[in-house]
Amino acid sequence: MTDLARQVVDLGASLFARGLTAGRTGNISVRDGDRVLLTPTGVSLGALAELSVLDTGGRHLGGPPPTKEAFLHLAFYRARPQTSAVVHTHSTHSAAVSCLAGLDPSNALPPLTAYYAMRVGSLPLLPYHAPGDTSLGALAEEEAREHHALLLANHGPIAAGGDLAAAADAVEEIEETARIFLLLRNTETAPLTPDQVAALRA
Ligand SMILES: O=C(CO)COP(=O)(O)O
Ligand SMILES: [Zn+2]
């Protein structure tokens, strides 16, 4: 197993052990030159043994069949050439927020904390599609041009980063902020001001 593949296995084990995705949910990918290593479909992130290999055009080059969300991962790589990794989870609080009525589709969570503003920024909500429904690909690719993190309605977060740690950081920060958001529901909150957010992202 290559060092990069080992990093995917270790990240999967870490996300699973911390309850950030359960059962056989979630998927991870990392770019390796002109190839992409992805978690296989139907496996627990806590028990990854081998990875699937695609080219950036989606051609299957080796390993078991890839995650059914491979098309979403590839949409991020196409839309954001600086992306080297993508992480998707079904983290509980993020998934709970993704089921709420009345969310702002352009930004599902307010900037309650500085780290959320720094690691995520804004979080467009993509309309519900069944897992693996490739008709979400075009919309995801369009949103990914401007945003490295998206929330899939009635599903969970997906985030891209310059490396695996950055993509995981974004998904974890979404989960922490979703938890805070739900803890504070029906309470008046004081999110960061646009100036405070801009200062953090400068
Ligand atoms: O999270 C998932 C679907 O959205 C898990 O599917 P895969 O096992 O195909 O990766
Ligand atoms: Zn999923």
Image: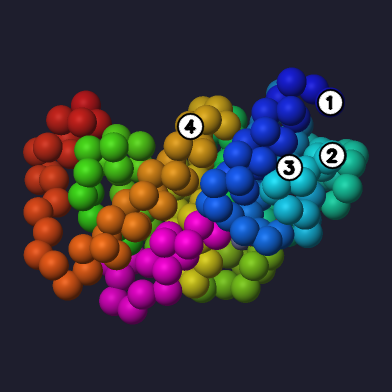
Tell me the crowding category of disc 4: few under 14, some 14 to 19, or many 20 or more residues within 10 angstroms, Cα based.
some
Q: Are marks 1 and 2 in contact (CB under 8 Å)?
A: yes
| Nearest to N terminus: mark 2 or mark 4 | 2
Q: CA distance from mark 3 to mark 2?
A: 9 Å
Q: Secondary structure at mark 2?
A: loop
Determine if the magenta segment contains residue 181: no
Q: Residue at x 28, y 37 (%)?
A: 115
| Nearest to N terminus: mark 1 or mark 3 | 1
Q: Residue at x 30, y 43 (%)?
A: 116
Name the front one of labels 3 and 2.
2
Among the 4 quarters of the image, the one containing residue 94: bottom left
Residue segment shown in magenta: 90-105
Judged from this view, the residue extending furthest toward the front is: 17
| Nearest to N terminus: mark 4 or mark 1 | 1
Q: Is residue 51 above or below residue 166?
A: below
Among the 4 quarters of the image, the one containing residue 131: bottom right
Q: Secondary structure at mark 1?
A: loop
Q: Is mark 1 within 8 Å of ligand 1?
A: no
| Nearest to N terminus: mark 3 or mark 4 | 3
Give the residue number, with chain letter if any, for mark 2.
Answer: 50
Give the residue number, with chain letter if any, for mark 4.
Answer: 166
Q: Secondary structure at mark 3?
A: strand
What kind of residue is marked 4?
Ala
What kind of residue is marked 3?
Leu
Q: Are marks 2 and 4 in contact (CB under 8 Å)?
A: no
Give the residue number, with chain letter if any, for mark 3.
Answer: 38
